[in-house]
């Protein structure tokens, strides 16, 4: 069972603390698998493989534009999150699936969720060998969704970001995912109209259930996962980067 929680727009630091809290609860067996669906206020995140040169403006300049910068423990390089982008954070125990999932299989399933979700809106997308994420099938493929995950003791965090109505000019602040020779696109650009983000979220939640072969259930709040207050530890992001030997970073 995947419990789906929709959270609206969250600052990145809050979402990061929340993920850490839920990961620990999942490791303890106090909750089942959880899928967080949300948007972020404008932020650039640097994964564990990020190159600072892929930030095309200084952090001070970005701050003046209202864009935060965070280093985080997902795999991958640099990406942008902002309003109009559907962010999915699956907190899954990969040992609970039959057969058990490894890191590569998990990422391939995230790509499949995205391919099917875009397909439901009439957008044909594909994987590209050697690259992570989902791309259009145009002669010049454009990236419509980025993926970066973190796996610790078989429990996943981070996930994907699907550009729905995202302001694509924001990607000019970075070299997206460190790939300079391929453009970025959105569902709105591909469709020539503005899709409803809540509808996209509903489709993505359904596709998670189908691709991962399990039921999904929408819950009204995080507290409903336990029947009590989950709580979000108010710790600076740097304190959340203690690593285990079996952690995996992928993008």
Image (cartoon, helix red, strand yellow):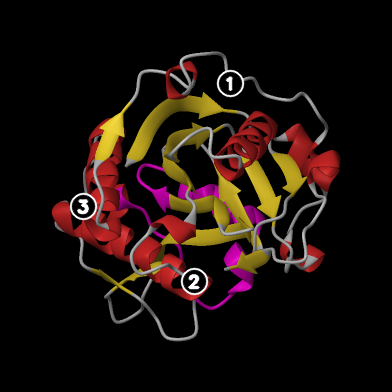
Indicate whether 202 appears above or below 146: above
Q: Residue furthest front?
A: 29
Callout 2 secondary element: loop
State the separation of the CA atoms marked 2 and 3: 34 Å
Q: Nearer the viewer, residue 9 or 101?
A: 101
Q: Which residue is mark 1?
A: 230
What is the x, y in percent for residue 180? 59, 74
Which secondary structure, mark 1? loop
Q: Nearer the viewer, mark 3 or mark 1?
A: 1
In front: 67, or 233? 233
Q: Nearer the viewer, mark 2 or mark 3?
A: 2
> Is 143 on the left-hand or right-hand side of 123?
right
Q: Residues within 10 Å of mark 3 (few under 14, many from 20)?
A: few
Labels 1 & 2 near each other (Cβ < 8 A): no
Q: Secondary structure at mark 3?
A: helix
Mark carried by residue 191: 3
In the rendered view of the protein, which quadrant contains the C terminus? bottom right
- Residue 152 horizontal side relative to residue 4, left or right: right
Relative to 148, say whether 44 is above or below. above
Q: Is residue 250 visible?
A: yes
Residue at the image position 58 percent from the left and 32 percent from the top: 41
Image: magenta residue range: 162-187
How far across and down, in percent of the image, does residue 225 sit?
Answer: 44, 24
Q: Is residue 93 magenta?
A: no
Q: Is residue 186 part of the magenta span, yes or no?
A: yes
Disc 2 target residue: 102
């Amino acid at each position: 069972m995947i419990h789906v929680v929709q959270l609206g727009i969250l600052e990145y630091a809050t979402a990061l603390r929340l993920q850490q809290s839920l990961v620990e609860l999942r490791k303890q067996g106090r909750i089942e698998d959880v899928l967080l669906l949300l948007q972020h206020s404008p932020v650039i995140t640097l994964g564990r493989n990020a190159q600072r040169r892929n930030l095309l403006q200084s952090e001070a300049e970005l701050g003046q534009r209202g864009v935060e910068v965070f280093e985080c423990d997902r795999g991958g390089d640099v990406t942008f999150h902002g309003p109009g982008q559907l962010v999915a954070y699956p907190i899954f125990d990969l040992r609970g699936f039959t057969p058990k999932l490894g890191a590569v299989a998990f990422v391939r399933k995230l790509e499949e969720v995205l391919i099917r979700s875009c397909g439901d809106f009439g957008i044909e997308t594909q994987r590209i060998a050697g690259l992570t994420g989902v791309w259009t099938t145009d002669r010049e493929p454009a990236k419509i969704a980025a993926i970066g995950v973190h796996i610790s003791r078989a429990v996943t965090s981070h996930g994907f970001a699907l550009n729905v109505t995202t302001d694509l000019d924001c990607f000019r602040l970075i070299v997206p995912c460190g790939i300079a020779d391929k453009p970025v696109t959105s569902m709105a650009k591909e469709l020539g109209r503005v899709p409803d983000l809540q509808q996209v979220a509903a489709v993505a939640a359904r596709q998670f259930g189908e691709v991962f072969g399990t039921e999904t259930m929408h819950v009204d709040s995080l507290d409903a996962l336990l029947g009590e207050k989950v709580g979000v530890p108010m710790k600076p992001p740097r304190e959340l980067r203690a690593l285990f030997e079996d952690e995996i970073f992928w993008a």
